[in-house]
Image (tube, grey):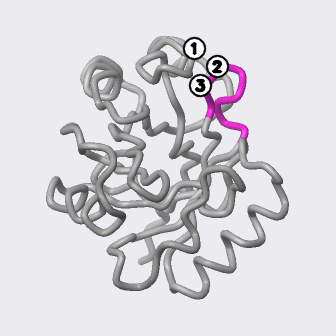
Amino acid sequence: MKFCVPRLRIDLHLHTNYSLDARTTLEEAIRYAKKSQLDGIAITDHDTVEGARRIAKEHDFLVIPGIEVSSQHGHILGLNITEPIPPKLGVTETAERIQLLGGLAVMAHPAVLDKGLGTKIDASSHIEAIEVINASGIPFYLSIYFSRRLAVRLRLPQTAGSDSHYPREIGSAYTLVDADLNRDDV
């Protein structure tokens, strides 16, 4: 007998007003995610887990706590963590700290012109996935092309996220995940 695991739509990269450059409240994040027919979101505020910690405990909607760490050479998402990671560390040290906390280290927007990290990593960097589609990435199609090429070269899974800083952007990109609707399985 085969069991069918649901395919979930999860925005794995969004910001709330706990990031200095974002306007979305925690309540708006949930409301707009539901409006976009998402099954879950990851709160990945810049260099803080405060909003993610708070909201993950308060809602019945799937919220993956996380952080977007400003490493020395670009941004790294730490998914499923509730402890902060200091900014300005090297790529490998940032990824290792995320993993020590039980999280997943995802390179954020590696091919975006102003914040890309793609040329700074290799297989020894401890990065576990590459964000291939970032709805805020400019130039959009070129960033997808180079990010996907990097993920294939490193043989890493590919993710997508809106990188939203405003409520209406939530769900503009998301990752399809074959998993049950709980944080650990996702």
Mark drawn on residue 34? 3
- Near mark 2 (Cα within 10 A), the count class, few <14, some 14-19 or many ≥20, is many
Q: CA distance from mark 3 to mark 2?
A: 11 Å
Q: Report the residue at 43% width, 37% height from top.
A: 44
Specify which label sits upstream in the sequence, 1 or 2.
1
Pointer 1: what residue?
Answer: 23
Q: Is residue 67 within the magenta segment? A: no
Of 2 and 74, the residue lying toward us: 74
Q: Report the residue at 49% width, 65% height from top.
A: 4
Mark drawn on residue 111? none
In the rendered view, does 9 fall on the left or right side of 133? left
- Near mark 3 (Cα within 10 A), the count class, few <14, some 14-19 or many ≥20, is some
Expressed as whole percent of the image width and height from the top left, the position of residue 153 reads 59, 88
Expressed as whole percent of the image width and height from the top left, the position of residue 183 reads 32, 46
Region in magenta: 164-172
Q: Mostly what secondary structure, the magenta segment?
A: loop
Specify which label sits upstream in the sequence, 3 or 2.
3
Pointer 2: what residue?
Answer: 167
Does residue 66 sit above or below 71 in this rendering? above
Q: CA distance from mark 1 to mark 3?
A: 18 Å
Q: Quadrant of residue 172?
A: top right
The quadrant the C terminus occupies is: bottom left
